[in-house]
Amino acid sequence: MADSQSSGQDFGAYLEANLASLRTEFHVGDKIEGVVTATGRTSVFVDIRARSDGIIERSELTDDDGNLTVEVGDQITAYYVGFHHEEGIRLSIRMAGRVAEATFDDAYETGIPVEGKVTEERKGGYTVELAGQEAFCPYSQIDLFRREPETYIGQRFAFVITENSEGGRNLVLSRRTLLEREREQQREQLQESLAVGDFVDGKVTRLMPFGAFVDIGGVEGLVHVSELGWGHGTKPEDVLQPGQSVRVVVLQLDWKEERFSLSLKRAAGDPWETVETSDNYLVGQRLEGTIVQLAPFGAFVELEPGIQGLVHVSQLGAGKRINHPDEVVSIGDRVEVVISNIDFERRRIALTMDGTLGADIEQFDDLPGIVVQPGSRVTGVIDGVRDFGAFVRLPDERSGLLHVSEIELRGSTNQRRALFDMFPPGSSIEVVVREIRGDRISLTLPETLERESEKLDAKDMTDSAGESLGSLGDLLGGLDL
């Protein structure tokens, strides 16, 4: 008997606690999360943790063909628009002029979204048809990022009313406000769950000379030009276009500074992972490739995006001794090569162009030390950004400075912000070694040297003794541009 009495008390306490947790107070415009519990001929019922289910008109949740877009058990977000003594709690996904309790005045006062159709472009923005009435949405308020005007014509969107005057005849709308709200919610969720190394889906928002910005649902990250593809010299416009859906890997997350680095090429997979099992990469195999870089010790040949081999200078001249690869090949040349040796562990491929097989791949062991010398063009990693420039970690693990004076800044008028946008820490970058003085290594960009070459004509330059210094081409002849 005591057990039965105790059990009854426990149930009563449970019921009381459960009822106490139910929501009893609502205000027009409140945003509510719930779960679909049932669907009827005209209504959809939603558990919103209240004393009764919320009710949404079925027509708000159907597609153009009249098919219901939700099922029992689905999570749903709606807005409280009023209480009817017979029907109960009324909810709306958005205002569309058919919810009697929610007028445009209510929507303006409470921020409840209204649904409208963009019908045409007009001066300063767009005309939007709102329940049979015309409203205006400025260009700046139609989206987070501006796209071609025709993108929006004929589309139906949710808006908030930001201005309501002349008795409701003058309505000004904003879609951007809603998108920013959603973005902030997504950002909070991302901050809890997103980690470096994660694969995420996103949408390209804009292209810049230094890379592409991708919206990953709450934040916008940068895919630096060096992370676009495994191929040499990939440009943003070669592989992407605004609005394109992409899969990327997270390289860096800096929530405080709002800097997020992404990689498109790493999401596609490392091409070297298939080299060892490929029939194309066997000693003696003849392949075609493109000369992508020249150095005093040889020519780098891209065999496929992300896979390069080296033809040592000793095997470039078909038996004839040459002093520099540029005597026989140029960057961009298509050449036929033969694989002499492969070191899968260190990811090195030795090539020949004169049919000499069996080249000792050990002769390339010291290449990093040779590459990092004045005039060499190398790929490094951004280690940090300061007001005066960016520090770059070079292949031999030394650090060089890319001074701001060597950079044509783009984007923000804030110098440091512009540097961060162009050179996010952790991203790869191609630089040219301008000078080495002890531990100090000065770097520049290939495009900076090209601009200098275009602006200056040094043919008539002379030293203090009147001796000719030669042309600018002579001065920069050792640089691999």
Image: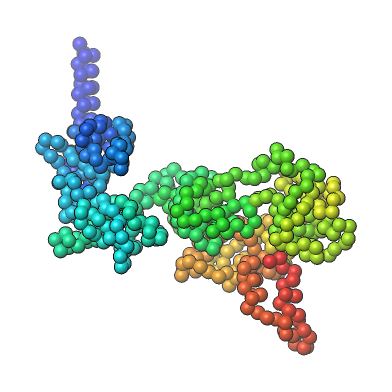
**How many numbered discs?**
0
Q: Residue at (65%, 71%) from the top-left corner? A: 449
Q: Residue at (73%, 57%) from the top-left corner? A: 334
Above or below, comparing residue 351 to residue 25 in the picture: below
List x then y, in percent, for residue 9: 20, 21
List x then y, in percent, for residue 258: 45, 56
Camera sees residue 390: yes
Rendered image coloring scheme: rainbow
Q: Name the foreground residue: 13 vs 106.
A: 106
Above or below, comparing residue 342 to residue 172 in the picture: above
Q: Residue at (54%, 58%) from the top-left corner? A: 236
Q: Would you identify the image quadrant in which residue 143 lies?
A: bottom left
Horizontal placement of 461 versus 141: left or right? Answer: right
Horizontal placement of 38 versus 425: left or right? Answer: left
Above or below, comparing residue 452 to residue 314 in the picture: below
Q: Name the outermost residue toward the front.
A: 65
List x then y, in percent, for residue 415: 49, 69
Q: Would you identify the image quadrant in which residue 295 lies?
A: bottom right
Q: Name the foreground residue: 107 vs 418.
A: 107
List x then y, in percent, for residue 327: 80, 65
Point out the image quarter for the C terminus: bottom right
Camera sees residue 372: no
Q: Name the foreground residue: 134 vs 329.
A: 134
Q: Would you identify the image quadrant in which residue 124 lies?
A: bottom left
Above or below, comparing residue 69 to residue 147 in the picture: above
